[in-house]
Amino acid sequence: MSIDLSLTNLINFFGIATGIGVCVLFLFLLNDPRLQKDVRRYFSLFFISVTCYLLFHMTRMMMEGLSGTVVRYALIIVTFLEFTVSGIMTFLISIMILYIANPEKAKKGLTIFLLTVTAIHVILLVISQFTDLFYYFDGDNIYHRSNLYAVSNLPSVLMLLLDIYLLIRYRNKYDPKTLRSFWIYMIAPLAGIIMQLIFPQIQFLIFATTIAGINMFVTIISVLSEQYQLQQTENARLETELSMAKRIQADMLPNIFPAFPERTDFDIYASMDPAKEVGGDFYDFFLLDDDHLAIVMADVSGKGVPAAMFMMISKILVQNYTLVGNDPKEALEAVNEQICKNNREEMFVTVWLGILNLTSGKLVASNAGHEYPVMKSPNGKFELIRDKHGFVIGGMEGVKFKEYELIMEKGAKLFLYTDGVPEATDIDNVQFGTDRMLESLNESANDTPEQIIKHMDESIKKFIKEAPQFDDCTMLCIEYKGK
């Protein structure tokens, strides 16, 4: 027998071939980088399934009625694959509808249900190959439906009923356009069946299902593209705001050097390198009068915008309570009480605060849970000052801090830092550490404060290499020259 080239078959061939071509085209369109990886993966699988389904169906149409044992076995295999892929297509649609609906408690159970129904569908098709349960081929290799053919559609019907329930029950979770495209996919097969009853020789059911699937894809991609554009606009707005916040934060810190060009009794330099656009570290220095310089180094818990906001509040409070004449101990206690009054987020800040007498070189300091300072005598090397730590600011009301004194001789240098310096980590998760920090300081011990900090920054970057920066890195160095 020859291939049937009747008008109805030509229409079927043309329609199916067109559907295959469109599916292949959409597979290429899925390379759009704006699409999320899981979206690309899902629709790639979906359109591969649709393409395979159409190919298997067209192959069966072309082979049906041809004689020969090989043809018969080929028809059996192709038809089995056609019915199997049809069930997979229904499963994929159901999974998408389920995961958008996202019923929290029932999601896992419904997923198992869909997998079970699909597995039963495949098992029944395997049984049909040996028992003619759903369909069979006669002696002329013509396809016929069995009396129980309707049962083959039961798994798909169960999944479609679940889809309809989800679309109604969780309709508020779907974008209106997406919801409409899902309903079209549900209703289209019914329209195809009605048309096929009128024109039984034309494969309206396949055409309707394919067109509805393509419509669903186009709609969802359109919605995702709109969301992508909105997200890009929002990202640009947030980036602008974060950039502005970074400039505002930087402007709050002393950032013009030399800071006191008219002063010859000391030289000071500081830097802050936030891990994110804005950070929680801060340094500060300001003259209380012509003879006293206040120095601050602090580290707020957390990162990003919340830490930056908390940082600005902490900086202002520390400065204000120091400027009114409090000693470091008294200033930190006052700041702690003020912060603890309104601290629902339970954030805290570690602070080292010192006041340097620029005539005598006496440094009075207090440490609220911050890193040890490092000092170098005029003819010595940088060494840790293991001062007494108090509790962090913002952790508990009524905390009392201790105070201590250091004498800075002419030529002495003081280095302050946050934990982002010793805890800088390389790609092997090895920390820079205090020993390397001291080693770097002593390599440039005779340099200016600016050169010391820049050398430290280079040492850290050389150590971590390509590893990302996990914490803010803030440093301050002062050299006391005396009057």
Image: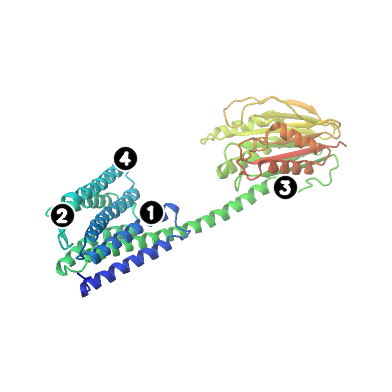
Give me the C-alpha separation between circle 3 and circle 1.
51 Å
Asked whether the viewer can see residue 318, the reply is yes
Q: Quadrant of residue 374?
A: top right
Quadrant of the frame with the N terminus? bottom left
> Do the residues under discs 3 and 2 have CB atoms within 8 angstroms?
no
Image spot of residue 268 (x, y percent): 78, 41
First of labels 3, 2 by sequence position: 2
Residue named by callout 2: 149
Q: Amino acid at mark 3?
A: Asn
Using the image, determine if residue 269 lies above or below residue 359: below
Image spot of residue 342 (x, y percent): 54, 35
Image spot of residue 481 (x, y percent): 85, 37
Give me the C-alpha separation between circle 4 and circle 1.
23 Å
Asked whether the viewer can see residue 325, the reply is no
Give me the C-alpha separation between circle 2 and circle 1.
30 Å
Element class at badge 2: helix
Using the image, determine if residue 16 lies above or below residue 109: below
* Residue 185 located left or right of residue 225: left
Q: Quadrant of residue 25?
A: bottom left
Residue named by callout 4: 105
Please name which of the two marks, 3 or 2, marks the residue nearer to the observer. 2
Count the marks.
Answer: 4
Q: Which mark is residue 42?
A: 1
Give me the C-alpha separation between circle 3 and circle 4.
54 Å
> Do the residues under discs 4 and 1 have CB atoms within 8 angstroms?
no
